[in-house]
Image (cartoon, coloured by chain):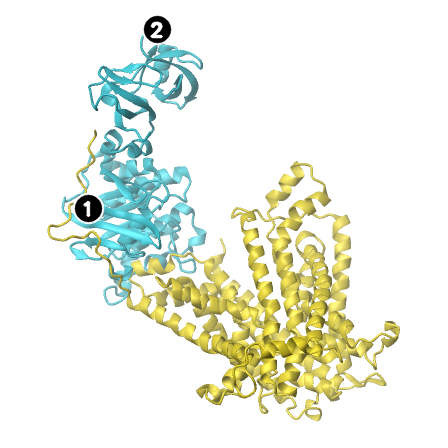
Chain colours: A yellow, B cyan
Amino acid sequence: MPEGSAAVAVPAAGLPALGRKVRRRLSPDQVMMRWTLVLAGVALVVALAAPMAMLLSRAFEDASGAWVGLANFATYATTPTLAVSAWHSMWTAAVTTLIVVPLAFVFAYGLTRSRMPGRGVFRAVMMVPILAPSLLPALSLIMLFGNQGLLKSWLFGGSIYGPTGIVAAQVFACFPHAAIILAVALATADARLYEAAEVLRAGRLRTFATVTLPGAAYGLVSAGVVVFTLVVTDFGIPKVIGGSFNVLATDVYKQVVGQHNFNMGAVVGIVLLLPALAGFALQRWARKRRAATISGRAVTYVPKPRLGRDLPLFLFCMAIAAVLVGVVGVAFWSSLIRFWPWNLTLTLENYDFGRFDTAGWGSVMTSLRMAGWAAVVGMPAIFVTAWLVERTPAAGLLRGVVGFLATAPLTVPGLVLGLAFILFFNHPANPLNIFYGGMAILALNCIVHFWTVGHLTATTALRQLDSEFEAASASLKVPVWTTFFRVTVPICLPAGLEIASYIFVNAMTTVSAVIFLYGADYKPAAVAAVQMEETGQASAAAGMACVILAVALAVKIAQVMASALLDRTTQAWRRR
Amino acid sequence: MNSGATTALAAGQAPPITGTPYLVIEHVAKRFGAFTALRNVSLTVDAGEFVCFVGPSGCGKTTLLRAVAGLDPASEGRITQGGRDITGLPPSARDFGIVFQSYALFPNLSVTDNVGYGLRGALWPKVRRRDRVAELLSLVGLTDHARKYPSQLSGGQQQRVALARALAPEPGLLLLDEPLSALDAQVRHHLRAEIRALQRRLGVTTIMVTHDQEEAMAIADRIVVMNSGLIEQVGTPEAVYRRPASAFVAGFVGRSSQFDAVMEPQGLRTPGGHLLPTPLLAPIGTLLRVFIRPEDIRLSAATGSGLSAQVTALEYLGPICRLALEDERLRLEAEASPDEMREIGARPLARLGVSLPASRLMLFPSDA
């Protein structure tokens, strides 16, 4: 037999090296990464897991804190008004989903698969509902079709208060969420599949049914899940336009604020959690099924101009855009009206908020400060956490736990998180209860509530970086934080801006996340708008909604411009 | 740069291998959960030596390199570098430079800043740092590209930046993790000669991981052939090619034909019933796996007696032709010069006389 080289080393005598367990030592920067990750985990436990656990436990207790098992749930199921609300929530959400998803699909198809003019403008207009508080479309609908509506006769005696109004307003509010998801799903098409279909002489319909739809299937499931969850968990719209039509979200509010029944509120909150959890499971299932169809070598599909397709799509998108702008326009117009609908002369009096609400313009300042704090504190916290989850060496379990905590808020509706926050932070035994009713708790709630989207944005940006940056800098004896600040942060700056503006805009517009938490001195603008509408000051409420929209729009435009500027000046290395 | 390499090689300059062990790997094992990536691996690398780890994907070659680098430290065993036990140390406490398959260049830093990235602290004042970067850029031939960003460079240029960055702090050990696999064939051939010349010039102990055995043969002083977490053989390119230690090495390194045969008193009996004359190498009746290199198969015009086979395919490669031969169940791959082909009348479907020199047969116990 041929002999191998004799270069194989013989272990030094007296050293039974085999079986010797190696103790891995970490460098100071690796240790620091690990402890920072621990810190992030503890923060998420305190601000998310502990409040949610408190909420869960309260659902199994009576008002005095005694364990009652499933008694609260039994009461819930046997109280007809409560069970009916659950049914109301389900079917309005289902109807909204069935309307929004097809509309958004055609709109997104026009944006990504046609050569119609004005695609950029449509893409911008599509975002408008996200920048407005959800009660804005409800206010517009009331102005048009409400008891004193201009077009009330169009309903032939029907009423906008109730399911009709809820669904109509939800369609407006949810449209951008579905359209964004579907535009992304349709934009990632593989041109090679279309070429193959063409070469195989498949007709347009067949290509659509066999290539386009399967490719977008995951997007369709995601969009459906997101819309359904948004409708079930939204508070502003049913509060404003629901009338006597009760849904889960308004039930929680009534139980907690109206009857101070925290235990029943917790039960309804858990019921509210179910559709989101089911949706999350459905999305995971769909993602698993999708995994096999994606190829790393996909070629971007670029549609060719074709009038027969582009013209109808253009007209469709125009119609949608007109409705979106029209709804905002009605709200804005009504905010300038002296006395709707009897005296249609224009005035700025409705913007003198002090006449309608004791906080006056102060609530706008509160919202600005809250959103500002949430964005300024939340963005770095979310980004650093995402980076640690991605890059901390040898901390598999820890990374998994923190990663889970970072993605969990997506399944927790704002109203439920808000409720969990009062139960936890307002507890007399909790040393953190000094924050209750203050600015910190509002900002913290917004950060946690919008954590997941920021985390996913950061993770996506980080995964585009080479996974060996930290290893390369370690081999060069450069501490990992130097590389973090010199390389990772500059590259991810656009993603960071996006996260900050996302948190800011959503903190400005949200009602459900803060309705339970604001103190007398810290009333956010969106809550003030809801209250003004409640007291019959619809025009002032519309004015407040428009102010929120204007601020959100300004921040969004500032972010887009800053990103463009950044791209032109500091990101020269991106160009080839 | 490349011409420098050629001159150095032409001059027959001996590699500056001192023969003193620099990196000693003893009984190293690595587990990822239930999966064992390395089992009891031992190896010594001499100072100044260029060693290649080769093997199919999943054989553990990259795992071993990452254990040496400390990126995924070994679970068991010991690794010493220059006499210092580094087994459990973090990468930053070790002394090495590394070039990743993806290069991991910092995209927002210029070539100069990338190369100078590790040159910081009291040891590298500004002037010394600038000089060192300039020296390395000229060494890899990128002086004109100093101000560019990585995305503005070709793949081969990026690779050289990564090499310069790894070498800048004068590491005692250079680790190359499939550094050439992202490049196209021509650039790859050119760069491997450059890397080899640079390594000889600097005398830095180098370990390269590659799945391309031809690349390993071309570049390494010694080759470490790995398979399913074990070292199959360590040896010079010639030793590994000519005297493979196992059937796996014989099949993995270089081209070869293989078939089963039974040891009989007169020689080896092929499946077709032919007898190959060899000295008695194994007990009578043993089933053996026989390997033979294409260049070792002697071809002649068919004579009627002895082993013959039909030409089933022919590839013209310029200096040589490659033939696929078949005789019932026996399949062979042979090579011949175009002149030889004409002389013996090798054409598709022609029958040729075949002889397999006993001294060139490589025999291993058969798995079957």
For the point 35% across and 21% down, which residue is it?
A: B334
In the image, B11 versus A395, the foreground residue is A395
Q: Position of residue B44 (x, y in %)?
A: 19, 46
Q: Point out the image quarter for the N terminus of chain A.
A: top left
In the image, A438 versus A167, the foreground residue is A167
Q: In which quarter of the image is residue B268?
A: top left
The answer to whether A8 appears left or right of B70 in the picture is: left
Instruction: Name the chain letter of the residue that bears numbered label 2.
Output: B
Instruction: Name the chain letter of the residue that bears numbered label 1.
Output: B
In the displayed structure, A397 sits above or below A307; it is below
Q: Is residue A217 visible?
A: yes
Q: Position of residue A266 (x, y in %)?
A: 58, 79
Q: Mark 2 points at which residue?
A: B304
Q: Position of residue A415 (x, y in %)?
A: 60, 77
In the image, B35 versus A157, the foreground residue is B35
Q: Distance between the residues labelled 2 and 1?
A: 53 Å
Q: Quadrant of residue A142?
A: bottom right
Q: Where is residue A478 in the image (x, y as percent from the top left)?
A: 31, 64
For the point 59% across and 86% down, which residue is it?
A: A365
Spot the residue most to the top.
B304
Mark 2 residue type: Gly
Give the mark count: 2
Q: Name the residue under label 1.
A: B44
Mark 1 residue type: Thr
In the image, B48 versus A35, the foreground residue is A35
The answer to whether B111 appears left or right of A301 in the picture is: left
Q: Are marks 2 and 1 on the same chain?
A: yes
For the residue labelled by badge 2, is the local secondary structure a helix, a strand or a loop? loop
In the displayed structure, B178 sits above or below B303; it is below
For the residue labelled by badge 1, is the local secondary structure a helix, a strand or a loop? strand
Label 1: few (<14), some or many (≥20) within 10 Å?
A: many
For the point 25% across and 45% down, which residue is it?
A: B199
